[in-house]
Amino acid sequence: MRIAPFLFLTPYALLFAVFWAWPIAYSLYLSFLNTRVYPWRLEVGVNWGRLLQDPFFWTALKNTLFILLVQVPLMLALALLALALNSALLRAKGFFRFAFFAPVVVGAVAYSAVFRLLFNTEFGAVNALLRTLGHPGYDWLYAPGPAMAVIIIALTWRWTGYNAIILLAGLQSIPKELYEAAALDGAGPWQRFWHVTLPGIRPVLLFALILSIIGTLQLFTEPFLITGGGPGNATMTLGVYLYQQGFRSFNFGYASAIAYTVALLAALFSFLQMRLWRER
């Protein structure tokens, strides 16, 4: 009888080993291979050493960190609108919660195409609105600053509702008695938010923050589909650069080194956040 649970787990364990564990281990091995020659040969420092000297890698890293430092705090701040979705004064809560979450349901290709149309320089709706206000508009997709702004706006539009729903779940887990006790002690709305709400959603907020950091470090879809990483690599992220090295240049060894760098950065940021936000 003791072997029965392991027998039930065997199919999953096999799938896990073949489609998850083995690719991860093999990609680590690839990161030490020189795949620009045939046959591939083991050269321990060829890929990892190149990372330190590759200006395109550092450009991609800088762009990724910029999005991380600007977009993630903005998105989580807007996600705190979940407070309104949890308010007893709000009517039709189900409708507003769905409307807030709906962008996540939209396919990445579809919404990226819509953003390319909205921010088109010549006939996009955004520039058309700016022209009616007397502004000539921006070259959104082909100027470095505006292109980065489009990526940040697109990410914020799509993922704010997702994080809001996560925070809403945390808000609903806070006992109402705590708010009643705080009100009886004379605490105002801001004090209740600061001393009851924030501590109550702290674990959930940390979870949303770590997910957002990991997702940003892996960011590929929006820069690739909306701006193509341009103009002039202005929106090229680590995910886009990894794709270019692996599936355009077929330099799988260097792409694997980039992938493991992303994984190490994600682990480092997650560890730092857990240390900073840990319960004291």
Image (tube, rainbow, N blue to C red):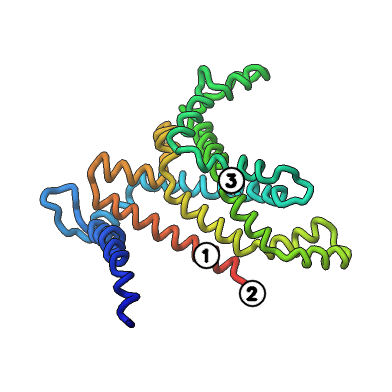
- Image-based side of 255 in relation to 119, left or right: left
Q: Residue 272: which disc?
A: 1
Of all residues shown, which one is farthest toward the front? 1
Q: Position of residue 171 (x, y in %)?
A: 68, 58
Dot 2 or dot 3, earlier in sequence: 3
Write down the residue under mark 2. Answer: 280
- Image-based side of 220 in relation to 247, left or right: right
Please name the amino acid that badge 2 sits on: Arg
Dot 3 or dot 1, earlier in sequence: 3
Q: Which residue is painted at 34% across and 57% down in the image?
A: 260
Q: Quadrant of the C terminus?
A: bottom right
Write down the residue under mark 3. Answer: 160
How busy is the neighbourhood of tag 1: few (under 14 within 10 Å), some, or many (20 plus)? few
Q: Which residue is painted at 19% across and 58% down in the image?
A: 43
Q: Which residue is painted at 31% across and 41% down in the image?
A: 244
Residue 52 appearing in the image: no
Q: Which residue is painted at 46% across and 44% down in the image?
A: 63
Question: Viewer-proximal residue, 234 or 248?
Answer: 248
**Cα–Cα span, label 3 and label 1:** 23 Å
Please name the amino acid that badge 3 sits on: Thr
Q: Position of residue 271 (x, y in %)?
A: 49, 66
Q: Quadrant of residue 41?
A: bottom left
Q: Position of residue 16 (x, y in %)?
A: 31, 63
Say above or below: 157 vs 206.
Answer: above
Report helix, strand or loop for mark 2: loop
Say above or below: 84 vs 123.
Answer: below
How busy is the neighbourhood of tag 3: few (under 14 within 10 Å), some, or many (20 plus)? many
**Cα–Cα span, label 2 and label 1:** 15 Å
